[in-house]
């Protein structure tokens, strides 16, 4: 999975998850991402800490993959003589989550 797809899918699933939780929450006792008492909506930072692995092998088959400790997805070369390098990337994306 490439980094662009990983970030996009993760953010989309977070927003969908918040909407689903809001629909299923007991509105009498719970508020999920509520507007504060002054009517303000707050920006939340979604933090990412990913390892990007680049693998190159003798068969000209290379790959780049995103590896997350939780998801464990990514790509790899199919050669026995593969070399790889891993880089860590940390960043956050400001998001206004849906309110009810």
Image (tube, rainbow, N blue to C red):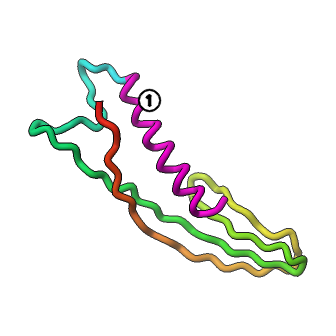
Residue segment shown in magenta: 1-24
Whether residue 60 sits left or right of residue 1 in the image: it is right
Residue holding disc 1: 20
Query: Dominant secondary structure of the magenta stretch?
Result: helix
Whether residue 29 sits left or right of residue 95 in the image: it is left
Quadrant location, the C terminus: top left
39 and 54: which one is in front?
A: 39
Residue 77, given in percent of the width and then of the height, sits at: 81, 70
Q: Residue furthest left?
A: 38
Occupied quadrant, residue 39:
top left
Quadrant location, the N terminus: bottom right
Mark 1: few/some/many CA within 10 Å (<14, 14-19, 20+): few
Residue 38, given in percent of the width and then of the height, sits at: 9, 39
Residue 61, given in percent of the width and then of the height, sits at: 84, 73
Whether residue 47 sits left or right of residue 51 in the image: it is left
Q: Residue at x 50, y 42 (%)?
A: 13
Occupied quadrant, residue 36:
top left
Residue 47 belongs to the span the image colors magenta: no
């Amino acid at each position: 999975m490439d980094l662009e797809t990983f970030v996009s899918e993760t953010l989309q699933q977070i927003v969908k998850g918040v909407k689903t939780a809001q629909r299923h929450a007991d509105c009498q006792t719970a508020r999920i991402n509520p507007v504060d008492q002054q009517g303000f909506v707050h920006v939340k930072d979604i933090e990412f800490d990913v390892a990007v692995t680049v693998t190159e092998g003798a068969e000209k088959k290379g790959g780049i993959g995103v590896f997350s400790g939780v998801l464990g997805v990514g790509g790899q070369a199919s050669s026995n003589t593969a070399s790889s390098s891993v880089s860590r990337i940390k960043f956050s994306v400001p998001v206004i989550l849906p309110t009810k």
